[in-house]
Image (cartoon, rainbow, N blue to C red):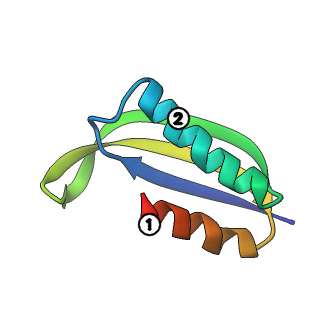
Amino acid sequence: MRTYETIFIVHPEVAGEELEALIDKYRQVLVDQGASVLKVDNWGNRTLAYPVKKQARGSYIFMVFDGMPSIISELERRMRID
């Protein structure tokens, strides 16, 4: 198993329980694929380096997990769907 870090950015209007539900959803994707989540940090709203879809800010979520390389493709697929 390898240790991976990922940062994903969520629309700034997604907050509170809705944001926690989204984080739990991605955590569960990792656990279902056999990974162990070591750390999840919400870095809060930050300014993006450049606007993305007319948004200048976003909520940064940092995750550290142990897992097999095959887990990455499933996590990316689920994130693209959302």
- Identify the residue at horizontal 69%, vertical 40% (top origin): 39
Q: Nearer the viewer, residue 12 or 18?
A: 18
Residue 32: image location, x then y, percent: 77, 55
- Identify the residue at horizontal 54%, vertical 68% (top origin): 76
Query: Where 55 falls versus 79 (above or below)?
Result: above
Left or right, 66 with reference to 9? right
Where residue 69 sits, quadrant-wise, is bottom right
Residue 19: image location, x then y, percent: 45, 34
Instruction: Kindly identify which numbered label has been placed on residue 21.
Output: 2
Residue 51: image location, x then y, percent: 17, 57
- What residue is disc 1 on? 80
Lower sequence index among marks 1 and 2: 2
Q: Secondary structure at mark 1?
A: helix
Q: Determine crowd level at label 1: few under 14, some 14-19, many 20+ residues with C-alpha closer than 10 A.
A: few
Residue furthest to the right in view is: 1
Query: Where 11 falls versus 53 (above or below)?
Result: above
- Identify the residue at horizontal 83%, vertical 58% (top origin): 34
Residue furthest to the left in view is: 54
Q: Quarter holding the N terminus?
A: bottom right
Instruction: Kindly identify which numbered label has been placed on residue 68.
Output: none
Left or right, 41 with reference to 80? right
Q: Quarter holding the C terminus?
A: bottom left
Q: Amino acid at mark 1?
A: Arg
CA–CA distance between discs 1 and 2? 17 Å
**So how many labels did they put on this image?**
2
- Identify the residue at horizontal 12%, vertical 55% (top origin): 54
Q: Nearer the viewer, residue 30 or 81?
A: 81
Left or right, 81 with reference to 34? left
Q: Amino acid at mark 2?
A: Ala
Query: Where 55 falls versus 81 (above or below)?
Result: above
Where residue 53 sits, quadrant-wise, is bottom left
